[in-house]
Image (cartoon, grey):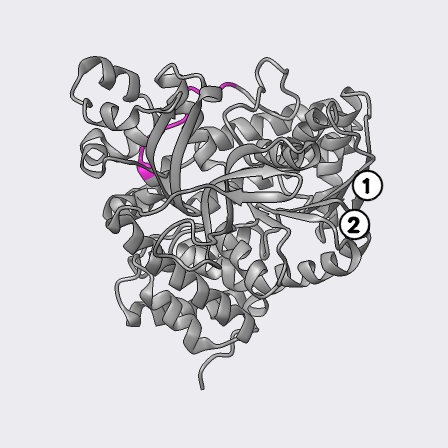
């Protein structure tokens, strides 16, 4: 089997490799091909990856390339983890809206809009290559905004063998199961929504629904003690969970606590993107030094320290709190005991998808795929995020039915915004792009939307040149 990673110089690539090493125990893997146009960064990631694979006994061949056609040709699975414009592009995405009093976030609101605008044409070109050079391959999309990119691939790429992935729901389920002392293998988590816009409305254990009762007893000291350390409870507060009768995905913080998120980012003095630019540049400097010294062991140690810092700071800027103090070290060189992967992670989800398809496991996991009428009130071709059964024939959405109207209304307008953004990216229409940003719930007016769009076009330059500015 050949597995290709587009965006192979990304800092999460060694974590992907760690998961692929676990996968290789069950499935014979011949080649892993890492492709990235940034050859300098790819060479540094290569230093870490080769050491990690060497420690595992080199169970497969790893190739590094800046040529996408060579990397894609003959692949059985293609993982997309590209970032058009790199981290500096993310900084622009996040800081421009802040100057206009709007939250700046990588995947939500104007930041996700701009990332989608410049990423979709590149992603569709890769899709054309896959259909030409590896027509039987499955495309696993991690590229953000994942739901929007997956929607673009199904709508304009006319590719059905694509699965969008986010690790947020799986991580939520794992933490809840641990807090409530539930055996996850006996539980079904009733989750629905769009990527980064979803809700958990039920937990069924041996067929009995337990979440409703738990949310109705949040004043109980024992229930409170069990739940108060959870990421989502710390973010949203127990009163909101009682009002919703559901547990929201963490990214709904930007909708439910928009003013607070904006204030936290402003008071922090830097966005998540600026933090990552600073710490990633420091990592690359250390990897350069390790490479010059011919010391791959040191490179892995530096990488592990970086990953821990990155994890500890996750959503700390936006919420003003440290929500990840209990995370055990899980770097690329972690032991099996400390790196079980059971709490999720994009790389772990990729492992589970590939294993389910290759071994026909009929495994249930939350994925991004076509709705097909499963969620009432959304079109059958709308890409949604919901539980699916994965087997050798692909992914099959499980029943959801009618969802609460307050959730459906938000999903409908955000899905329309996504489709307009995709249309603007493909057609180059400035007016369609402006309309898309105007209707987003986090953008307060058409005037502000236009100011943000124009500043994006000025700052991003060539990567947004396909959007034709109005005369």
Closest to the observer: 208 or 76?
A: 208
Residue 331 at least partly seen: yes
Dividing the picture into quadrants, the one containing residue 98 is bottom left
Dividing the picture into quadrants, the one containing residue 189 is top left
- Position of residue 430 relative to residue 436, above or below, is below
Closest to the observer: 363 or 217?
A: 363
Q: For this view, does 246 lie left or right of residue 4?
A: left
Magenta span dominant secondary structure? loop
Q: Upstream in the sequence, badge 1 or badge 2?
A: 1
Identify the disc placed on residue 215: none
| Separation of marks 1 and 2 at Cα, in angstroms | 8 Å
Position of the C terminus, as image quadrant, is: bottom left
Residue 152 covered by magenta stretch? no
Dividing the picture into quadrants, the one containing residue 447 is bottom left
Residue shown at 64% from the left, 51% from the top: 161
The stretch in magenta equals 319-328
Residue shown at 81% from the left, 49% from the top: 74
Identify the disc placed on residue 71: 2
Tell me if label 1 and label 2 are in contact, CB under 8 Å.
Answer: yes
Residue at image mark 1: 63
- State the image coordinates of residue 252 (x, y, percent, origin top left): 33, 44
Residue shown at 75% from the left, 49% from the top: 39
- State the image coordinates of residue 243 (x, y, percent, origin top left): 18, 37
Residue 320 covered by magenta stretch? yes
Q: Residues within 10 Å of mark 2 (few under 14, many from 20)?
A: many
């Amino acid at each position: 089997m050949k597995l290709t990673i587009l965006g192979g110089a990304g800092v999460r690539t060694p974590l992907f490799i760690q998961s692929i090493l676990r996968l290789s125990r069950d499935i014979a893997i011949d080649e892993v091909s890492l492709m990235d146009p940034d050859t300098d960064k790819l060479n540094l990631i290569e230093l870490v990856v080769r050491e990690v694979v060497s420690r595992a006994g080199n169970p497969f061949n790893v190739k590094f390339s800046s040529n996408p056609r060579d990397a894609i040709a003959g692949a059985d699975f293609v993982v997309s983890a590209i970032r058009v414009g790199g981290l500096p592009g993310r900084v622009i995405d996040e800081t421009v809206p802040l100057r206009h009093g709007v939250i700046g976030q990588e995947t939500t609101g104007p930041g996700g809009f701009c990332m989608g605008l410049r990423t979709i044409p590149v992603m569709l070109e890769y899709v054309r290559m896959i259909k030409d050079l590896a027509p039987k391959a499955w495309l696993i999309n991690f590229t953000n905004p994942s739901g929007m990119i997956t929607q673009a691939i199904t709508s304009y790429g006319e590719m059905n063998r694509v699965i969008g992935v986010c690790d947020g729901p799986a991580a939520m389920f794992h933490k809840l199961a641990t807090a409530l002392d539930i055996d996850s293998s006996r539980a079904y988590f009733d989750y629905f929504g769009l990527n980064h816009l979803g809700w958990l409305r039920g937990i069924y254990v041996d067929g009995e629904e337990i979440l409703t009762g738990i949310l109705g007893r949040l004043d109980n000291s024992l229930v409170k003690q069990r739940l108060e350390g959870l990421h989502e409870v710390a973010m949203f507060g127990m009163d909101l969970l009682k009002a919703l009768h559901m547990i929201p995905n963490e990214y709904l913080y930007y909708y439910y606590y928009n003013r607070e998120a904006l204030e936290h980012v402003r008071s922090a003095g830097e966005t998540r993107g600026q933090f990552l630019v600073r710490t990633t540049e420091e990592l690359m400097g250390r990897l350069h030094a390790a490479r010059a010294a011919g010391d791959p062991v040191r490179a892995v140690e530096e990488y592990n320290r970086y990953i821990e810092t990155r994890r500890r700071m996750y959503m700390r800027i936006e919420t003003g709190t440290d929500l990840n103090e209990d995370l055990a070290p899980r770097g690329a060189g972690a032991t099996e005991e400390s790196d079980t992967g059971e709490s999720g992670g994009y790389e772990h989800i990729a492992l589970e998808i590939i294993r389910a398809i290759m071994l026909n496991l009929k495994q249930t996991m939350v994925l991004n795929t076509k709705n097909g009428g499963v969620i009432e009130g959304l079109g059958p071709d709308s890409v949604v995020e919901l539980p699916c059964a994965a087997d050798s024939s692909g992914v099959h959405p499980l029943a959801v039915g009618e969802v609460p109207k307050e959730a459906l209304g938000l999903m409908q307008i955000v899905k329309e915004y996504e489709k307009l953004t995709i249309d603007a990216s493909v057609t180059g229409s400035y007016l369609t792009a402006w309309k898309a940003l105007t209707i987003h719930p986090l953008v307060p007016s058409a005037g502000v939307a236009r100011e943000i769009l124009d500043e994006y076009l000025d700052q991003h330059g060539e990567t947004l040149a396909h959007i034709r500015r109005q005369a």
